[in-house]
Amino acid sequence: MTSLPVYLAYAKINLYLEVLNKRRDGYHNLETIFQSVSLGDRLEFFPQPEKITLECDNEDLAGDASNLVVRAAQLLQTRFGVSQGVHIRLSKRIPIAAGLAGGSADAAATLVALNQLWDLKLTLYRLTTLGLELGSDVPFCLVGGTKAGRLRGQDLHAMHSPVAVWYLLVHPNLHVSTRDVFTSPLLRPSGEIPFAGWTCSFRKARRRLEDGDFAGAMFNRLEYVVFSKHPELASIKERLLRAGSIAAGMSGSGPTMFGVFRSREEAEKAAHMFSDINTSVVCPTLVGVNCLEG
Ligand code: C5P
């Protein structure tokens, strides 16, 4: 079987995440700072007639239409009347349902790859609109890097990358449902009104981050909700700070926690203090999807 190039789909963390208010469509308006990181799933695409099939090396992940990769392929196939199919091979490296947008990253890579394989000539704007139908993080995963996001997170704006740092990701073996976090009575949206696009709190955080002040900038409104149910995550945050991180927090709706370090060596040293939990040492990436080889 001939295949297309290999694609890497990178995970993201949220360096800042504020919930402004609940919308009429049930989602929430957010202000967030996304950062893509060098932990990526690997996807290969093999042309085949008609059918869409998925093979994955992680048996916890369904290969049927509940998988975002399959849904992304089906969306393109039905929306654009494509008669060809595809077999997709997915090597999972990003922990599942971890607040790292692993499923969204895979869906974004699938949109990019099939746009090429099926010669659809869709613009990034069009892919973004389609991506949002699959999940709020898919638009960011299409572009990656360091971005300010608002509305559901799909309205993305370029940011200066903060100073070079390394991240230690700590992956507790817990399941957190994003939907449950957003519908929890414990969630108290800030209610702050944006002025000329963004709130004052967000502008302050963004400025601090661009100046390298991670401790002053980092925030996640969802932490309170998730920590109330899983206090062990608050302990991990404490442990990350004690292990020498400049700042520590939760990514998205969790449960992945991360610490910010000045060097790879410091992040790796701190990882030894988490021998009881899975960890990854990663650095920022400039893109969300990377086409590796022809
Ligand atoms: O868009 P996605 O499928 O990732 O969202 C999962 C759930 O998270 C939604 O069903 C919704 O309850 C919640 N959510 C939200 N506001 C957002 C993003 C997600 O309420 N901006």
Image: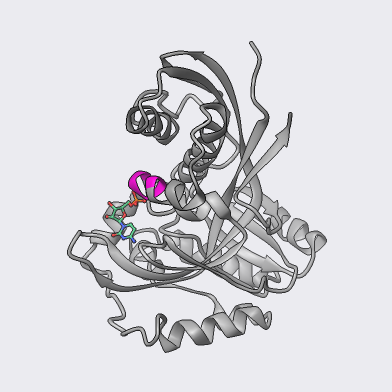
Main structural element of the magenta stretch: helix, strand or loop?
Answer: helix
- Closest to the observer, 176 or 49: 49
Check the image and report above or below for 168 versus 88: below
Tell me the residue at 49%/34% (across/down). Answer: 120
Q: Quadrant of the N terminus?
A: top right
Check the image and report above or below for 166 versus 46: below
Ligand 1 lies in quarter: bottom left
Check the image and report above or below for 117 versus 35: above
**Left or right: 23 in relation to 237:** left
Say whether residue 61 is magenta: no
Residue 243, position as x, y percentages in the image: 68, 67
Name the quadrant containing residue 292.
top right
Tell me the residue at 26%/60% (across/down). Answer: 27
Q: Which residues lie in the magenta part? A: 130-134
Q: Which color scheme does this rendered protein use? A: one colour
- Closest to the observer, 26 or 214: 26
Residue 102, position as x, y percentages in the image: 51, 44
